[in-house]
Image (cartoon, grey):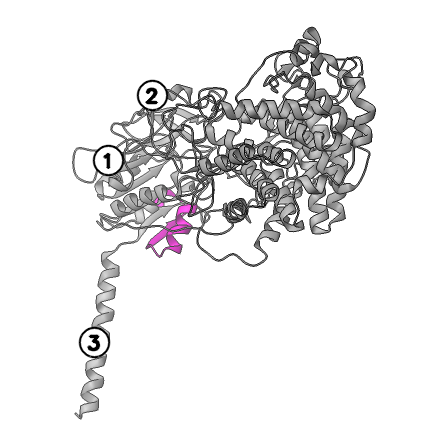
Amino acid sequence: MNKEQRYNLCLFMFSLLCILFCQSCTMGRQKIAISCDEENDLYRVMKENNIPCIRFDSPEEAILQAKVGGGVMILAQGYPAETVKLDSALYKEVVAKELRLYIEYPESVPGYPSKGVRETHWERAVVSSDAFGPQLEKNRILMIHGGRYVEMKLDNPDVVVARVAGFDSAVYGIPETGIPVLAKVDLSSGEGGEIYISTTKLSHFVTGRYAPMEAWSEIWSLLLGWLTAENSPRELVWQPTVTPSFTRDESLPADAEVKALQRGVEWYIQSKILLSETGNAIYDKGEFPMGDRIGEMPDSLMSGNGSYGVLEGFRSQIFHDGTQPVLWWRRCDCNGEVAGAMTLAGVSLGKSDYLDVGENIGRWLFSSIMTQGERANPESDAYGLIGWNDVPHYYADLNGYDVYYGDDNARALLGMIMAASALKTDQFNQRIVDGLLANLRLSSKKGFQPDRINHSELVNNGWEVYSQSENVSYSGNFQAYIFASYLWAYKQTDFELFFERAKTGIHTMMAGYPEKWGVTGIQMDRARMLLPLAWLVRVEDTPQHRSWLYQMLEDMDQDPLTGTIPERIEDGKNNFGVGHYKLPKTNEEYGATESPIIQTDGDAGSDLLYAVNFAFLGLHEAAASTGDPLFKEAEDKLAEFLIRIQVKSALHPELDGGWFRGFDFNRWEYWASNGDAGWGAWSIESGWSQSWITMVLSLRSLGTSYWDFTHQHDMKKYFDDTILMFFKDASIVIN
């Protein structure tokens, strides 16, 4: 045998040894036997991650075909309607073959009787043991969206469902009422009797959008490691069905901002919250299965053209199939804001159909019950105001249109000012002017409106009582955009009362900063105050007015890595967040009222409903009013953040292009405390969030500001003809 032949023989023998070694490793790593349907999330993800497994159609097949000492998973099929039914003889087979069994959503287990199926409401999943090591500590909070679970008594569970307060951790501990979700139990006293029971369908984690992602990866790592009798973790990686549009670090395409605007506006159409005639009939019927006008969007429903207004948006709840319920409310603020966003996008993107939709929404709003009735009667103290929503008896005997929030009025009017300016039409001018003057005469000598006024109180008191009061409300959330609307109107009219009330209110707010602020959370108020401070500089540019604007920017503490505005509740030693939007002080208070999306400062949450969205507009206007690149740089960073975290989903087109309220900028995932009653972490508001974000993107595209764009639209004549009608005795409010 020559040298070359010897070399080839050695090479052949080495290759053969490698093959035999690989075969022995494969034989040592038995495949996990799984009973499930082919579309089960866990089964698909295990195959994608090359984890050895073999699927069977029934639990019987999986258990009988499994090798002695092997791992078996009985995954729920027909969830949530059907629980898993397993004959007692099969449990005996599990013990006899010393199988490692994971079973989920079982009807019953020998020795562990079921008390029936329950549905989660405010409960969240909580890690209740040290089984997952330092990666997933005890008290860690998880979300099993739309969860149903079989109630059974399981000792020493690793995960429970319970009503707990907190962002990442149950800050007040786990209540004794926690119901087991995942536990290891013994079927016999001998070997081979240990099994894992999940009382819900944990394998539904992709479809059900369970969160946060890294936590569920840790749970599956433990379970798969146990099933395969291996100590090494079996990490799973998967693609969520709803994700941010871009990662934290990837380079953005040159057209990313334009595409974000296009998708943000198209969201209104593909989400179908623009009501059609059929949708309007559903709305008027008022019968919704979840109560409080909350229901699903029928698949057959088509998007409208704005002629029947726009719904409020998507509620934060997520169903077991990953969809979300719709808030079947038509609110004044949302409709006015969306009218402005759609028409401005029509100008920015050159889309006449957007202009038409925005115009239709405006016409609907100004002909709806929210602007009619007493609000259209010149002899009424409510004349010119806009009711909160259009639902009769929305709460007890109180009609939605007989409730007036000054802030909602202001934002509705600012939206309609934009719509009139973009359309270059005077058809809305008189109603806008009426609305601004109606709100002005409800502001106190200090410049503040009551946070809310009911129609009956207004009629009983008369508008003069409010105008002559000394009322003060240190809430940027409720007051800032009222100030801003007055400053805008003053530029149009030179009517001193607009400026006097706005300036007095702003000065009072800033004199109380920060100690008296925080009825809604300190960052929310800072973000809101940016706009009136920016416009105050437009009207009266003084060193003090500029210094306040710079102070808001500095104190918001923009995150240098992501560009977002971190949510904050406290400021230094001052404990804020104690007013309208309360922090839960106990587990029982979680979900009981409107509340922030974080529990303590340091939680990495961004709030796109109350802070980030309004900061975006405020920074844009501040950059234009001061000409200082510092504000432009902050605005650009925030714009990039918003572009990156815009919702992307092929499976859920109704969500694609939207912006959820809560975002965890450390995890880069949609995650936050979901305790706010109605508008939690996964809500999408058609007005507040979506409208102002897209409006600012349009303004950036056009290279202009709200102030400059809208003041080209002259309404002075309408003001001159109307002021005396509202203030027949001007000395009442001027002196």
Where is residue 9 shown, x and y percent of the image? 20, 83
Of residues 704 and 260, which is closer to you in this image? 704
Q: Position of residue 592 (x, y in %)?
A: 46, 20
Dot 3 amino acid type: Phe
Q: Position of residue 516 (x, y in %)?
A: 47, 21
Residue extending farthest bottom:
2
Q: Amino acid at mark 2?
A: Thr
Q: Label 3's element?
A: helix
Disc sitting over residue 181 in the figure: none
What stretch of residues is rendered in magenta?
Answer: 41-61
- Can the viewer see residue 267? no
Look at mark 3 in the image and give the residue it sits on. Answer: 14
Q: Tell me if label 3 and label 1 are in contact, CB under 8 Å.
A: no
Asked whether 476 or 124 is in front, the reply is 476
Q: Is residue 303 magenta?
A: no
Q: Nearer the viewer, mark 1 or mark 2?
A: 1
Q: Earlier in the sequence, mark 3 or mark 2?
A: 3
**What's the residue type where badge 1 is placed?**
Asp
Q: CA distance from mark 3 to mark 2?
A: 62 Å
Within the image, what quadrant is residue 494 found in? top right
Q: Is residue 490 visible?
A: yes
Q: Is residue 51 highlighted in magenta? A: yes
